Structures are given as structure tokens and as C-alpha cells.
Image: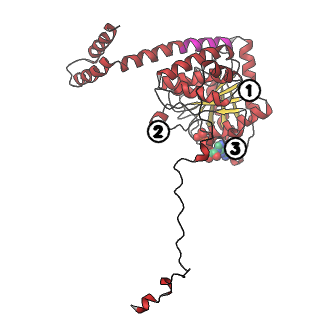
Amino acid sequence: MNNIQHHPENDPQYKGLTVNQGINQPPLVNPYLSGRKKRRNYSLSEYVEQILKGNITVLSQAVTLLESQKNEHQSVAREVIEKCLPYSGNSVRIGITGVPGAGKSTSIDAFGVHLIHQRNRKLAVLAIDPSSERSKGSILGDKTRMEELSRESDAFIRPSPTAGSLGGVARKTRETIILCEAAGFDTIFVETVGVGQSETAVHSMVDFFLLIQLAGTGDELQGIKRGIMEMADGIIVNKADGSNIEKANLAAAQYRNALHLFPLPDSGWSPKVLTYSGYYKTGITEIWDMVDEYMAFTKQSAYFECRRNSQSKYWMYESINEQLKNHFYQSPSIIDELSVKESQVLRSELSSFTAAKQLLDRYFLRF
Ligand code: GDP
């Protein structure tokens, strides 16, 4: 016992193990952040004025508004779009597609830097990726995939809208094009994964459709949907570098041959096939010379105007279809009745067509 009392740690003068006075718990919210500007709600005229001045922050907010599910946001967005419409249209709209791994992001990064520095362009990169609704996050148009471009002040990169059907996602992207053009972007990329229906949506909003392909897989022409090749105004074979150059040239020759089998597109332009390396940045000048040549060709033949007009018409009908469909499926009386009819159809008590007719009759009777 005595021993313990004489232990040096029990001596009040002992300094070996002192407990410092604790520090206060820091606040949960960083006080230095409170001085930061909160996101402002702009008025309609402020939105339009700032977008026309090329203010990217306000442009981003307007795009967020049009992607919002809230009706009040959408109605402001619609008015902003209407006001920006007269200032839009003055750009080259390019659809870019390719299977995952084809090198879309590497290429867009390289193309973007080339366009900004060699051709004095302002570039907006948008994306259509309906699958992002399921994965709850967009892969396409992700800034981290385009490292160099994301540091450029003349580039605006926006991932795909994440909510909604393909039609809804595509409509929002098309509206974003209008806002970007009003903000002074003269080159618009719309990126999509070359695996599904989204190409058709992209094709119906761009002037030039670029298909990125790979060589060296041994079965170049397999796995590419004929429809996608038919839509392409240019096919570019990526990764033509190192020991892959020969294979890329061979693949390009095969694509050229395959294209001869297709009828000449309405534009009158014979799609070109080029090889390049997005990673080593070779062959890129030739690709943009091709796009410029196409633009001059279609503007001279008036096909350019014609294609844009028919796209506007297409989107009017698409919009009607989409909104009618949404309205139907969101009507409370239909929501209740849908599952009832569905079970009746599954039990073979009612045919699919009669069930559909009864639901539609019920819907139309209310209006
Ligand atoms: P994405 O899925 O179509 O966007 O393809 P990425 O751009 O992510 O590219 C997929 C892979 O291919 C990455 O590992 C790239 O580094 C590589 N890659 C892309 N372009 C080239 C190229 O021109 N040459 C070579 N050798 N590799 C490339």
C-alpha cells in the first residue's frame, strides 16, 4: 500500500502523464463556409441575360432547372428556352457513339482540346444515357473522364440527365443544346453508348453522326448493328497506334467496303472512314477537316436546313407523345385501375386489347 502511495505517478508534481485540457468540439457546419454565396434563384430575365452573356454557372443552373421533376422548375425552364431559342442554332451539333471501351472519353478529350486550341471553338459536351436512371449516376459526360477538357474555360461538360425514359432524357438533352448555343457554344457534342436505341435519339438531334470503332477484334463487322452504321456520317477507327496501325487500316478498308453496300444517304454525302489515335492524338486534324467539309457540303445543298427542320418537327411529335403518355400513366384513376386490369389479363379473363381499350376509354371520358 505504502509502495503505491510512493509511486511517482501519484505525486502531484509528476509531469510524465498529464492530461491536457480538452478542446471544444468544432461546430458541425464549417463556419468559414457561411460566407460563401448561396445558390441564387434567378428571375426569368436574369437567367436569359446571363446565359446570353455566356455565364456558365447560370447556364448550369438553368439546365438543372429543366432536368428537375418539379413542375414550377420546368415551367421556368420552358420560358428560358423560349427566350433563348432565337439565339440558338448557330453551331455544329455532333453525335458521338461507340461501344464501351472504344475510347469515347479519351477521344472527346483530345477532340475538344484540338477544337478549342486549333479551331478557336467553344465546346459543350452533353450525353444521353438512359441506363443512368438505373445505375443512379451517369457515366457519360462525366468530367473526370475528360481530364484535359474539364480544365478548359471554353468547355462545358454536362452528364446525362438521370431521370426518366429515353424520350424524356433525350428531350432534355435537346433543350440543353438550345441553352448552350444561346450561351455561345458553337460546337456541341452529344455522346451516347453504342449499344441501344439511344443512337436514334441522338441522330435526330445532330448534324453529323460520328461512330467510333475499334480494330483488332477479329470480327470488325460483327456486333455492330447495321442500323448504326447506316446512320453514321463518318466512321473513325480508334487506337491506330503502335502495333495496331496495320489492323486499324485493315478494319477501315473493311468498313469502306461495307458502306458501299448501303444506299447513299439523303444528304448525298458518302460517309468517310478514317483511322486515328485518341490517346496519342494523331489523325485528329483529318477528322475535323472531314466534319467541316460535310458542313460546307450540306449547307451548300440546303440539306443542313432541311435536316434541322425535320428534326424540329420530329421533336414536336416526340414531345406530344411523351407528355400524353406521362399524363395517362400519372392519372390517379388510371394508376388504380392499371393493376386490376393487368391481373385480369394475366388470369386470361380479359384480352390485352380489351384491357387497353377499357383503360383508354376511362381516361378519355374524363377529358
Ligand atoms: P469509352 O468507354 O468509350 O469512353 O473508352 P475510354 O476513353 O475510357 O477508353 C477505354 C480504354 O482504351 C482506356 O484504357 C484508354 O486509355 C484506351 N484508349 C483510348 N483511346 C486509345 C488510343 O487511341 N490508343 C490506345 N492504345 N488506347 C486507347
Q: How many numbered marks, from 0 up?
A: 3
Colour mode of the rendering: secondary structure
Q: Give the residue type that dot 1 points to.
A: Met
Specify start and end residues of the magenta stretch as a single range.
303-315
Task: Residue 263: tell me if it is visible.
Answer: no
Q: Which residue is tagged 3?
A: 279
Residue 208 coordinates in the image, percent (x, y): 66, 23
Residue 2 coordinates in the image, percent (x, y): 41, 92
Q: If the image is split into quadrants, where does the C terminus sit?
A: top left
Q: Nearer the viewer, residue 11 or 355?
A: 11
Q: Give the residue type that dot 3 points to.
A: Tyr
- The crowding category of the residue bearing disc 2, from other C-alpha atoms within 10 Å (few below 14, some 14 to 19, many at least 20), is few
Q: Which residue is tagged 1?
A: 290
In the rendered image, residue 294 lying in the magenta stretch gets the answer no
Above or below: residue 83 compared with residue 39: above
* Mark 1 or 3: the one toward you: 3
Q: Mark 3 near ligand 1 (CB under 8 Å)?
A: yes
Residue 252 coordinates in the image, percent (x, y): 67, 34
Residue at 75% across, 12% down:
300
Q: Mostly what secondary structure, the magenta segment?
A: helix
- The crowding category of the residue bearing disc 1, from other C-alpha atoms within 10 Å (few below 14, some 14 to 19, many at least 20), is some
Q: Is residue 321 left or right of residue 339?
A: right
Task: Residue 4: tell me if it is visible.
Answer: yes
Residue 159 coordinates in the image, percent (x, y): 58, 34
Is disc 2 placed on a helix, strand or loop?
helix
Does the CB distance between marks 1 and 2 fall below 8 Å?
Answer: no
Q: Which residue is tagged 2?
A: 135
Is disc 1 placed on a helix, strand or loop?
helix
- The crowding category of the residue bearing disc 3, from other C-alpha atoms within 10 Å (few below 14, some 14 to 19, many at least 20), is some
Using the numbered discs, state the Cα–Cα distance from disc 1 to disc 3 in whole angstroms: 20 Å
Along the polypeptide, which appears first: circle 3 or circle 2?
2
